[in-house]
Amino acid sequence: MFSFIVQRLMVGIVTLFGVAVMVFLIMRVIPGDAAVMLSGAGAGAVSEEELAQVRTQMGLDRPLVVQFVDWAGHVARLDLGTSLRTGNPVFDDITRRFPYTLQIVVMATLIAVFLGIPAGVLSARYAGTWIDQLLQALSIGGLAAPSFWVGLILILGLVSLFQWSAPLLWEPFWVSPVKSFTQLIWPALAVGLRQLALIARMTRSIMLEVLGEDYIRTARAKGLSEWHVVIRHGLSNGLLPVVTLIGFEFSALFGGLIITEAVFSVPGLGQYVVASILNRDYPAAQGIVLVLAGIVVLGNLTVDLIYGWLDPRTRLRGAET
Amino acid sequence: MTTSIGLPAAADGDVVAVLDAAPSRGGRLRALGRISRRHPLGAFGAFVLLTIVVVAVGAPYIAPFDPIEGDTAALFSPPNSTYWLGTDAFGRDILSRLIYGARVSLMVGMGASLLGVVVGASLGIVAGYRGGWADIITQRVMDAMFAFPMLLLALAMAAVLGPSLQNVIIALAMPIVPRAARIARSSVLVLKATAFIEAARATGCSDTRIMLRHVLPNTFAPLLIIATAYLGLAVVQEAALDYLGAGIQEPEPSWGLMMSGAATSLALVAPWIVIFPGLAIFLMVLASNLLGDAIRDLLDPKLQRDYP
Amino acid sequence: MNTVVAQSLLQIRNLKKYFSIRGGVFSREKARVHAVDDVSFEIMKGETLGLVGESGCGKSTTGRAILRLIEPTSGEVWFQGENVTKLDKRSMRHLRKEIQMIFQDPYSSLDPRMTVSSIIGEALLVHGLAPGRKAREARVVELLETVGLSSEHMGRYPHEFSGGQRQRIGIARALAVNPKLIVCDEAVSALDVSVQAQVVNLLEDLQEKFGLTYLFIAHDLSVVEHISTRVAVMYLGKIVELAPAKELYINPRHPYSEALLSAVPVPDPTAKRERIILEGDVPSPVNPPSGCRFHTRCALRVPSCSQNEQVLTEVSPGHWVACQVRTGAVAN
Amino acid sequence: MTISGPSNTDAVTRRDVLKTGGAALAAAAAGPQWALAQGAPKRGGTLRVSNGGDPPDFDVHQSATYLTQFVTAPCYSTLLRADPNDYDKLIPDLAEKTDVSADGKTVTFHLRNGVNFHNGTPLTADDVIYSLERIRKPPRGIVSPRKGLLGNVDSMEARGSHTVVVHLTQPQPDFLFMVSNAFNAIMSKKVAEPLDAQGQGMKRQIVGTGPFRLTQSIDGQIYELSRFDGYFGQPAYLDKIQFFPIRGEIERGAALQGKRIDAGFFFPNEGVLQTLRRVSGMTELRRPTPTFINLIPNIQRKPFDDIRVREALSLAMDRESFIKTVGPLAGAFFHSHGLMPPGSPYSLSEAEIKQFSGYDTLPGLGGNIAANRQKAMALLEQAGVPKGFKVVILTRGDLPAFRDSAINLSAQFKNIGLDVTVDVRDTGTFYTMETTGNFQLVAHSVGMGGAVPDQILGEGYTSYGGRNYGNWKDDSLDNLFREQSRELDPKKRAALIKQFQLAFLKTYYQINLAWVGYGAAHWNTVKGWKALPDIYANMQMDKVWIDA
């Protein structure tokens, strides 16, 4: 097991290296550079000579390979550099914004799990009835609605019905949990809807499959109540793929939040990464993409581990090939 | 193991299902009728998509107004008898823009998902079939693309390429590539171990022939499923790109564009500007998901057993 | 039955195939499966060589290595004076016209997305035989009829056929290129007993008709007995006995062959054969026993069996055994 | 509810330049004073405002955005400042007395005594000279987009610790306006110099002499200023000013409506303002600003090197319709005759502007757009531009003044048979393409930090000005500009300015479309703040109080 983890981590590091190369190259290929953006872009009277000086100052005039090696070297020492835009260490910027994003992700996941799994179970339990059909229609709808559109509609509704407006100061969770919860519930809902639908659908189909298995028949034959059978025997055995889905979606959520954060103007990672790319803030954009990719890699690893833990059959997967 | 991140449909297991699902040539038409009776939702999805295609193709004949030239006397008109769905900030008829926008959204959706799936599947099939270093390198590159947040990858690509329609399609296809590659590769690994691939080799088929004639047709179904699923996703992502200002160019009407830019800041005074394009996207994604579901059900022998 | 065959068609020399088990952080080789471990034999033109052994003994691997469906670790395969193991991809594809294979599982060895006509026609197509669509179709019909199917089956898909019919399609596919050698890899194992006989008979008829040579791989001696000229018995990657079929059935010398043979039902109920039950399980091919690989389960074993590697020794003309006890090299 | 709406273009007071030429500004004894009939000011309270985004950084000299300027303005002082009651007038700020020599070539600033920076160090002439030099000739690694403001400065010297003498290369009646531009903050030499040497500049800190000092800054959340007790003038009424970077206009409007903020300083969008206008107790302001939207053809690219093509573009424009559609989206409601902003004393007459192609479609001038377009097509044909010629209008996606102008233009140009597409790029790409000449047409919105001719004409319409994206070269125009700039006689100068405008308009190097007005809104509880046409002026907020 240990060597499996180590092996997966190594693969993860290789992956991250690939991401690093990609984001580095992409940022350099995008027209317009940090010097232009940070020199009062559009003011018009900034000469090419001044820009060249700024580039030298930022080290942007060095060969790309040198810049990459320099950056990668710092990243290896967990130093993501200094944001060209905010002047703060990128790491600090990220850690300050990360809690909001994480909280939305966690809340969205909780909403999805606590509504999605029961909905799926209910759907499976009453498969074929109107309850099932209604829930299925809702979940297909939930999948189809673009999350930022849901966000916009939510805002529209909130504003016109409750005179709601986006909070000015987003309280961190540890300062005021209740306030923070009420502030972030809307974006969490907007992004969580999709996860909810996914989980409900997945739970339903797995439950249907599991409920057809022999041991469920046995349980039924023993005269246990239907709900007992569904929950104790069905759900607990069908949880594995749902866990996988949650794990994968959890990490995919981080990327998907970008747009929802923009809609709700949450000061999370999403806004930061978009602003960094648009402002050609190389260290920031590179750093945050790397962090987001790291989350995806870790998420996948966690899923693998949970999988191995829940299902011993997969434990030796690494040794097969 | 599930490889369908962020996807409602498509799992590796489908490959096995496909092996038993080849319809005979004669009964196809009859089968179509049977299928739509068994999968009314799938038929509905196909119908909606088809309608969108028809509307898109016939846009100049169907649209009541010019989608670009606005009526300056009717800015922000709420839905009324002239402008059924109202007008936007430039006095442009929303219905007409939706009708013309179907072209862009369809092209983006189909283009991106097809391109992404074709490129991804080719990479996945070749890598999976060949194995060795090519496979390892492809896998690592795909992993890196995979770990790159989907929207950011598209955003960055759009910024690199510039925002023309074809570039947006390329940008949106990028995140689909690794996903399609993964699914194709895992299908190929399953297939590779099957006897009929070995038989083809024993027969003397070249690798290219085996990949094209034996591997591809047998991975086709899962790929078709993910293609329908990503069609919807690409449409949504295009809207998101537009929202972030890196998508389709004005005045070209695209559904995503209609929900972003000036539109959103006016949503409070003129909510119809935002609501209708969103509904259109919703409908299209819904349709493609339903169709994907139906295809999936059709190809799953387990479910077929339930319908004798 | 021909007992003397002048011409050697295929020679296998010191064939080895090890599979690596990799694991750990750097995918190091952790262990090896000794699937085929130093096997040599030859097949004469026109004969049928039966290759038997329990599953996992390496017989299928041997068959696949001949066609280079898997690459041997070492050793040589000579076919008509050509070293098959040295051929490049292109020549290898060409050689596949000469050597064909019939697979064990008639369900999975046919591409479910292709019609019977394209499955059989594919071999013709890739080797440029019967050029033109019409000619190809005519040839496919001919082949179908040869194996007992008819032209109306051409447009159908494999799943529309029964197991026996599918195996006939597989045979037709192998025949399509007029091969000299056909490797029948457990060609009838997956079929019902009644169907087995039909297919075996078909194979025999075809052999006669087209002068084919077979390497007939099976785990069941009874099938092999019927069709083979000579039989080789494999145990854990090695050939332990090689003899003319009749000779082997009458007078098996290796204790493992004896045990295998004792499990074969005898058509004559009066003839009584003592059933030998082997003790223990087949050892793991990852760590095969030292010396004679069979010694862990052998009733005749002596202490030196676990040390001495056994070599095939000719005990009577054409009858080779790898057992120091039976060949008299050591005292029982 | 006070409205200074789109139609009310006369709200700008007439500029009286005569006051500045060769005269001395009288010292006001106890700092700036003006009467605002809003009751007795109250001390205390926090003003919560939003202006639409995070300041990229705090170095106002290096910046070109209101996002930076609005947050830093209360913390800095300038030599002179705009009179909130009379935009055409300057009143003393750091310079308690200003002398201009009779030949107009020497300007002497007598600095106030006892002025301290936020870090406690006293202000001296060295700080002023360092700051102005920093703008005029920035140190290595520092960029200065407004070098042109001080382009006429020949040299500067300190006479004693509190006197700064500026020598000009030629007389310049507008010089005091140029030097007092709201962006030309006086920074501490001691603080800035070492940071400049490192190339960092003043991006991360604000050390000024203004009435407020920066006490908290969280990127994406809040920028908090607190009253600076060591301020040299009358202490500010407010305890605190909190800036919230609410990006979306709708969200900003909603926050204002929900009383989560007291004022919103940047509302270009009419839709949001419309909503706010309905709220009682809200003061909504919209005023024209010296911000123009011009169509800029790339003179270096065929066929736009041909004046007939440029004239055709001007003819194709229905300016009234442009104002009607882009107005509500980008605030581009306003129009003016000629190159100077609405309400300028130098504006051309109706008859004068009408002689230029296409300008007769400005509101009220009764132009015939159909006839204009016929003429435009004829011109295109003469110039050999084929029908269906492909034209790309470059624009940026983040600002409505750019994006929505381009969209409107594209629709209008289709009427003269051009095949127009809009190329929406993100800001960085847009500027790179624009400054490297990689475009055909651009609809560029330019916000000026002042409305004097030297600023508007110098930056916007000279070959060497910062806004010459179309890359033309015209010595006679440049000379004409220099001539008006040094003319001390107001009458003669006015004639030269008119002459310059007429000469420029004839070239169609740039085609004026509209002027932008920016809206602001605040609850009536906010007192003592007056919005000036120059959105950057009077943002020090020291006289603002909350009447809760």
Image (tube, coloured by chain):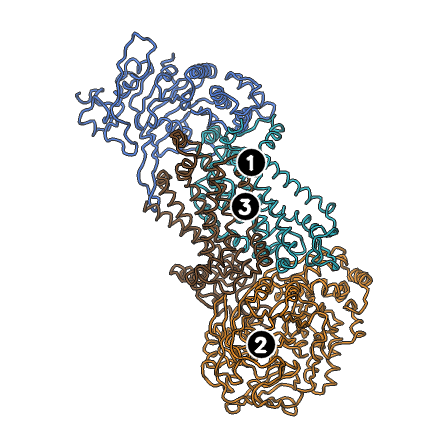
Chain colours: A brown, B cyan, C blue, D orange
**Tag 2 residue:** D539
| x and y percentages locating residue D16 in the rendered image | 70, 83
Q: CA distance from mark 3 to mark 2?
A: 48 Å
Q: Are marks 3 and 1 on the same chain?
A: no
Q: Position of residue C196 (x, y in %)?
A: 42, 17
Which numbered disc covers residue A143? 3
Q: Is residue D277 above or below residue C313?
A: below
Q: Amino acid at mark 1?
A: Ile
Residue under pointer 1: B295
Q: Is residue C165 left or right of residue D383?
A: left
Q: Quadrant of residue D135?
A: bottom right
Determine which quarter of the picture holds residue A163. bottom right
Instruction: Say few, some or many: other residues with alpha carbon within 10 Å of mark 2 (under 14 / 14 to 19 / 20 or more).
Output: many
Type of the residue with mark 3? Leu
- Please name which of the two marks, 1 or 2, marks the residue nearer to the observer: 2
Q: Chain of mark 3?
A: A
What residue occupies the far top of the structure in this picture?
Answer: C270
Residue located 37% across and 33% down the image: C72
| Location of residue D504 by image quarter | bottom right
The crowd level at tag 1 (other Cα within 10 Å; few <14, some 14-19, many 20+) is some
The image position of residue C80, as x and y in percent, is 42, 25
- Horizontal and vertical percent for residue B188? 47, 37
Q: Is residue A119 left or right of residue D380?
A: left
Q: Amino acid at mark 2?
A: Met
Which type of secondary structure does the marked residue at label 2 adopt? loop
Q: Nearer the viewer, residue A272 or D278?
A: D278
**CA gap, disc 1 to disc 2?**
63 Å
Q: Nearer the viewer, residue B171 or C77?
A: B171
